[in-house]
Image (cartoon, grey):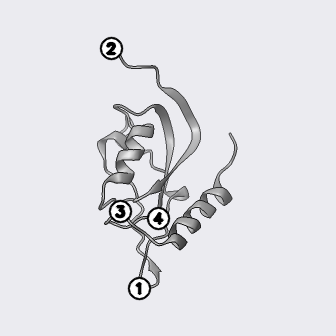
Amino acid sequence: DGLATKLDATGVKVYIVDTGLKGTHEDFLNDAGGSFIDESCSKSFVEIDGSSDNKQLKDGDGHGTHVGSTTCGKTYGVATCDKLCAVRVLGDNGSGAFSWIINGIEFVMENCQEN
Protein backbone atom coordinates (compact mmCIF):
# COMPACT_ATOMS: atom_id res chain seq x y z
CA ASP A 1 0.00 0.00 0.00
CA GLY A 2 3.04 2.30 0.01
CA LEU A 3 2.61 3.31 3.65
CA ALA A 4 5.33 2.77 6.21
CA THR A 5 4.68 0.60 9.23
CA LYS A 6 3.33 2.63 12.14
CA LEU A 7 5.26 2.91 15.39
CA ASP A 8 3.61 1.21 18.34
CA ALA A 9 2.81 3.67 21.15
CA THR A 10 0.16 1.47 22.74
CA GLY A 11 0.05 2.09 26.50
CA VAL A 12 2.05 5.32 26.22
CA LYS A 13 0.41 8.66 27.01
CA VAL A 14 1.10 10.95 24.06
CA TYR A 15 0.72 14.63 24.97
CA ILE A 16 -0.25 17.15 22.28
CA VAL A 17 0.58 20.66 23.55
CA ASP A 18 -1.23 22.99 21.14
CA THR A 19 -4.70 24.45 20.47
CA GLY A 20 -6.59 21.45 21.89
CA LEU A 21 -7.96 18.38 20.14
CA LYS A 22 -11.35 17.96 18.53
CA GLY A 23 -12.58 15.05 20.64
CA THR A 24 -15.10 13.89 18.04
CA HIS A 25 -12.66 13.81 15.10
CA GLU A 26 -12.95 10.48 13.25
CA ASP A 27 -9.19 9.91 13.39
CA PHE A 28 -9.37 9.74 17.20
CA LEU A 29 -12.14 7.15 17.43
CA ASN A 30 -11.32 3.57 18.38
CA ASP A 31 -12.93 0.53 16.77
CA ALA A 32 -15.77 0.61 19.32
CA GLY A 33 -16.58 4.22 18.33
CA GLY A 34 -15.21 5.83 21.49
CA SER A 35 -12.42 8.39 21.53
CA PHE A 36 -8.91 7.36 22.57
CA ILE A 37 -8.27 10.89 23.86
CA ASP A 38 -7.70 10.42 27.58
CA GLU A 39 -9.55 13.15 29.49
CA SER A 40 -7.71 12.31 32.73
CA CYS A 41 -4.45 13.69 31.29
CA SER A 42 -6.01 16.51 29.26
CA LYS A 43 -6.24 20.10 30.45
CA SER A 44 -6.66 23.65 29.15
CA PHE A 45 -4.39 26.47 30.28
CA VAL A 46 -6.06 29.07 28.05
CA GLU A 47 -7.63 31.70 30.28
CA ILE A 48 -10.62 33.91 29.71
CA ASP A 49 -11.18 36.52 32.42
CA GLY A 50 -8.70 34.70 34.68
CA SER A 51 -10.30 31.24 34.47
CA SER A 52 -9.56 28.20 32.30
CA ASP A 53 -11.81 27.96 29.26
CA ASN A 54 -11.99 24.13 29.72
CA LYS A 55 -11.92 23.61 25.93
CA GLN A 56 -9.14 21.00 25.78
CA LEU A 57 -11.42 18.67 23.77
CA LYS A 58 -12.39 21.40 21.32
CA ASP A 59 -10.12 23.02 18.75
CA GLY A 60 -11.30 26.30 17.24
CA ASP A 61 -8.06 26.73 15.29
CA GLY A 62 -7.58 23.15 14.02
CA HIS A 63 -3.81 23.05 14.44
CA GLY A 64 -3.80 20.83 17.54
CA THR A 65 -6.15 18.35 15.85
CA HIS A 66 -3.86 18.31 12.79
CA VAL A 67 -0.79 17.64 14.95
CA GLY A 68 -2.62 14.95 16.95
CA SER A 69 -3.85 13.28 13.78
CA THR A 70 -0.37 13.31 12.24
CA THR A 71 1.01 11.80 15.43
CA CYS A 72 -1.64 9.19 16.32
CA GLY A 73 -4.50 9.42 13.83
CA LYS A 74 -6.03 6.16 12.59
CA THR A 75 -5.62 7.08 8.93
CA TYR A 76 -2.18 8.67 8.49
CA GLY A 77 -0.75 8.87 12.02
CA VAL A 78 2.86 7.82 12.38
CA ALA A 79 2.08 5.85 15.55
CA THR A 80 -0.68 3.60 16.86
CA CYS A 81 -1.83 5.16 20.14
CA ASP A 82 -4.49 4.37 22.68
CA LYS A 83 -3.89 7.31 25.07
CA LEU A 84 -3.78 10.76 23.53
CA CYS A 85 -3.67 13.76 25.91
CA ALA A 86 -4.88 17.23 24.90
CA VAL A 87 -2.96 20.06 26.57
CA ARG A 88 -4.45 23.33 25.32
CA VAL A 89 -2.00 26.24 25.58
CA LEU A 90 -3.06 28.24 22.51
CA GLY A 91 -6.43 29.86 21.88
CA ASP A 92 -8.79 29.61 18.94
CA ASN A 93 -6.71 32.20 17.08
CA GLY A 94 -3.57 30.05 17.42
CA SER A 95 -1.79 32.33 19.87
CA GLY A 96 -1.39 32.38 23.62
CA ALA A 97 0.34 33.86 26.61
CA PHE A 98 3.80 32.64 27.57
CA SER A 99 2.40 31.69 30.99
CA TRP A 100 -0.15 29.33 29.36
CA ILE A 101 2.60 27.60 27.39
CA ILE A 102 4.94 27.32 30.38
CA ASN A 103 2.12 26.00 32.60
CA GLY A 104 1.21 23.43 29.93
CA ILE A 105 4.78 22.18 29.62
CA GLU A 106 5.10 21.98 33.41
CA PHE A 107 1.81 20.01 33.53
CA VAL A 108 3.21 17.47 31.06
CA MET A 109 6.49 17.20 32.97
CA GLU A 110 4.64 16.62 36.26
CA ASN A 111 2.14 14.14 34.85
CA CYS A 112 4.00 12.05 32.30
CA GLN A 113 5.33 8.66 33.25
CA GLU A 114 8.04 6.61 31.61
CA ASN A 115 6.68 3.49 29.96
Lateral position of residue 37 relative to residue 111, left or right:
left
Type of the residue with mark 1? Asp
Q: 10 Å neighbourhood of mark 3: few (<14), some, or many (≥20)? A: some
Q: 10 Å neighbourhood of mark 2: few (<14), some, or many (≥20)? A: few
Q: Are marks 3 and 4 in contact (CB under 8 Å)?
A: no
Farthest residue toward the bottom?
Answer: 49
Report the quarter where the N terminus lies.
top left
Q: What residue would you read off at disc 4?
A: 89
Lateral position of residue 21 relative to residue 100, left or right:
left
Type of the residue with mark 4? Val
Label 2 vs 1, first from the N-terminus: 2
Q: Are marks 4 and 2 in contact (CB under 8 Å)?
A: no
* C-alpha separation, residue under disc 2 versus residue under disc 3: 35 Å
Residue, x 35% and y 52% (percent of image)? 63
Q: Tell me the SS state at disc 3.
A: loop
Residue, x 55% and y 34% (percent of image)? 10
Label 4 vs 2, first from the N-terminus: 2
Q: What residue would you read off at disc 3?
A: 94
Q: What residue would you read off at disc 2?
A: 1
Q: What residue would you read off at disc 1?
A: 49
Label 4 vs 1, first from the N-terminus: 1
Residue 95 position, x and y percent, is 39, 66
* C-alpha separation, residue under disc 4 versus residue under disc 1: 15 Å
Which of label 3 and label 4 is nearer to you?
Answer: 3
Farthest residue toward the right?
Answer: 114
* C-alpha separation, residue under disc 4 versus residue under disc 2: 37 Å
Residue 5 position, x and y percent, is 46, 20
Which of label 2 and label 3 is nearer to you?
Answer: 3
